Amino acid sequence: DSMYKPCNISACNAVVSRNVFGKTDYPMDEFHLSQAFHDNPEIGARWLNYHFDNFVQKEDLIQLKEAGITHFRFPFPHWILGDVQGDEPWIPADRWQYFLRFCGWARDVGLEVWPNIHTAPGSQNGFDNSGIQYSVKTCGAWSENNKNVQRSLDVLLEVSAAIKKENLTDVVTGFGLLNEPFWDCNRFKYKKFLEDGLRIVREQLGPDVSVYMSDLFNAPLFNDGDWGLDPVQYNNTFLDSHYYNIFADEARMLL
């Protein structure tokens, strides 16, 4: 594409802004990346689509299959199908169509796809991978805002219904309700969200679809002898624990 070429940083007029740490930087999350295209969102969509079109190819899936991989975790932003409200800068572009292409490849190759809602309105953790980076890591902007929690449930319904409509349930065999909400989430509200999300996804994708749920970076919280014990409701569910051994000395000591 003639629109894209290598950029000499010293010559390019790159978009920089003040980040959450008080330093001038390039966009470090998709919120600020989208803001950089504020005056030309159609160019932003073209830029994103170029990335999606080239980031993963069918040959990559073939190599994964040959290496013994059986499942692929596919992250979704909550705006993948257009959940953009107010002055939010999110640019959906053609992500959904690229997801459909990916599922077709996975079906051909023999891989199962387990999508995951990776972001939440307000941010569920303050990490850049939630869509927007904050200087303070917290779940509060999501879990303490009932509107944001409901938007996440609405996205679960919209996305799982779209997967069903596209007849993808043979290849989409699992679903993640929300990636890495931070440890300070309101525990009771979060567990209610998990129960509601589980019901929504199972109603759309069937009673046997695998559902995985993040553990608030504290798996023992879910060993309370009460939650998740119903063998019918919680059949084929998984607690999703992320151990960042590269960052945490104590995690490496446990190995």
Image (cartoon, rainbow, N blue to C red):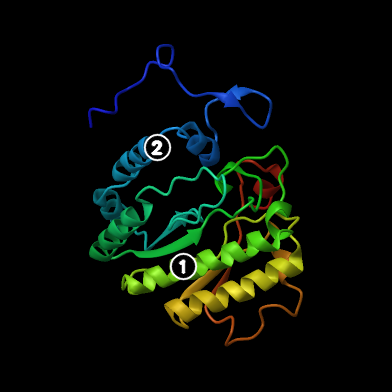
Residue at 66% x, 32% y is 20
Of 255 and 149, the residue lying toward us? 149
* Residue 216 image position (x, y, % from top left): 68, 59
* Residue 65 image position (x, y, % from top left): 30, 58
The label number, if any, that marks residue 158 in the structure image: 1
Of 72 and 40, the residue lying toward us? 40
- Decide: few, some or many residues near mark 1? Use Cα within 10 Å; few <14, some 14-19, many ≥20: some
* Residue 137 image position (x, y, % from top left): 71, 45
**What residue is disc 2 on?**
44
Tell me which amino acid carries mark 2: Gly
Q: Is residue 221 left or right of residue 230?
A: right
Where disc 1 sits, the SS reads helix
Total numbered labels placed on residues in the image: 2
Tell me which amino acid carries mark 1: Glu
* Residue 128 image position (x, y, % from top left): 58, 42
Q: Is residue 93 above or below residue 223?
A: above
- Compute the Cα span from label 2 to label 1: 24 Å
Where disc 2 sits, the SS reads helix
Residue at 37% x, 41% y is 45
Q: In this view, does 72 lie above or below 250?
A: below
Q: In this view, does 249 lie above or below 119?
A: above
